[in-house]
Amino acid sequence: MTTPEISFEFFPPKNLEASFRLWDTVQSLAPLAPRFVSVTYGASGTTRELTRDAVTTLHKASGLPVAAHLTCVSATRAETLAIADQYAEAGITDLVALRGDPPAGSGTFTPCEDGFASSVELIEALAAKGTFTLRVGAYPEAHPDSSSMQSNVDWLKRKLDAGADEALTQFFFEAESFFRFRDACAKAGIDTDRITPGILPIENWKGARRFAESCGTTIPTWLDEAFDKAERDNRTDLLATALCSELCSDLLEGGVKRLHFYTLNRPELTRDVCHALGVKSKARLQKVA
């Protein structure tokens, strides 16, 4: 089994305690030499300023390649592109370009007045600058606004044709979910080497289950049963590590070369899984004053 290239996703801190937790997470995972790390936006762009602060701070202090999430939500085209320009001026040229989720309870996505109407429009505008490495989302199973897997495939092809360099998928619980999607993408003429599976280490099954329900991820019955038993035996951490390692191993044996981990700013399980996959730690990150 080939040792994978890895990357990590963090979310921006909302208070001082969370800032220390984020830095501790980065300190723990940086020795694994990720290709890049990314910092998310909150729903409806609620953490835009926090994301920008976290991205620029990590870029300066960590020495890691940092990718900033950028969405179409709650901003005009000019405002969104101005943020992109600010990142470029700060030396940050990796972006994750997404449509973004609508505010809770607002129903379907509605473009802001004078805003980008879709992720494809955003990608085209960013690609035209010729400055950025652009990553986008992909959905191996359901998407709240998608009618079918084929629709997901068609949208991904449009995003890649618009200038995206790589796609990071929504998480899933069984390798076959990714392989079915990959096969459908190959049939549509997409270079599947540009599709990186997203992995969610299960720190807390109830929380992960709610997250999966909200984004349409299939929840296998056997997972409920496995975590019910593990909770009774006080072995949830052991189960989570084993399941995530097995999922990643299945993907690697199926030809996957890169993995993108959704860390939830909790590094221990992600780190343990990476070690199980043969990813070796290097020198520890030193904080830059």
Image (spheres, rainbow, N blue to C red):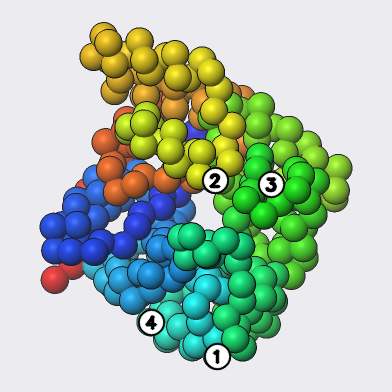
> Which label's residue is closer to the chain start, 2 or 3?
3
| Label 4 vs 1, first from the N-terminus | 1
Checking the image for residue 238, the label placed there is none
* 39 or 34: nearer the viewer: 39
**Distance between mark 4 and mark 1 Cα atoms:** 18 Å
Q: In the rendering, at what x and y percent does residue 221 appear?
A: 53, 18
Q: CA distance from mark 4 to mark 3?
A: 30 Å
Of callouts 2 and 4, which one flags the residue occurring earlier in the amino acid sequence?
Answer: 4
Q: Residue at x 75, y 48 (%)?
A: 147
- Look at mark 2 in the image and give the residue it sits on: 215
Q: What residue is shown with label 3? A: 193
- Tell me residue 160's x, y (percent): 72, 62
Mark 3, other Cα within 10 Å: few <14 / some 14–19 / many ≥20: some
Q: CA distance from mark 2 to mark 3?
A: 24 Å
Q: Marks 3 and 1, Cα distance to the nearest angstrom? A: 33 Å
Query: Which is nearer the N-term, disc 3 or disc 1?
Result: 1
- Badge 4, how many Cα within 10 Å: few under 14, some, many 20+? few
Residue under label 1: 78
For residue 90, which numbered disc appears in the image?
4
Q: What amino acid does circle 4 point to?
A: Ala
Front position among marks 2 and 3? 2
Between marks 1 and 2, how big is the CA–CA gap?
29 Å
Q: Secondary structure at mark 1?
A: helix
| Residue found 42% across the figure and 45% down from its top | 262
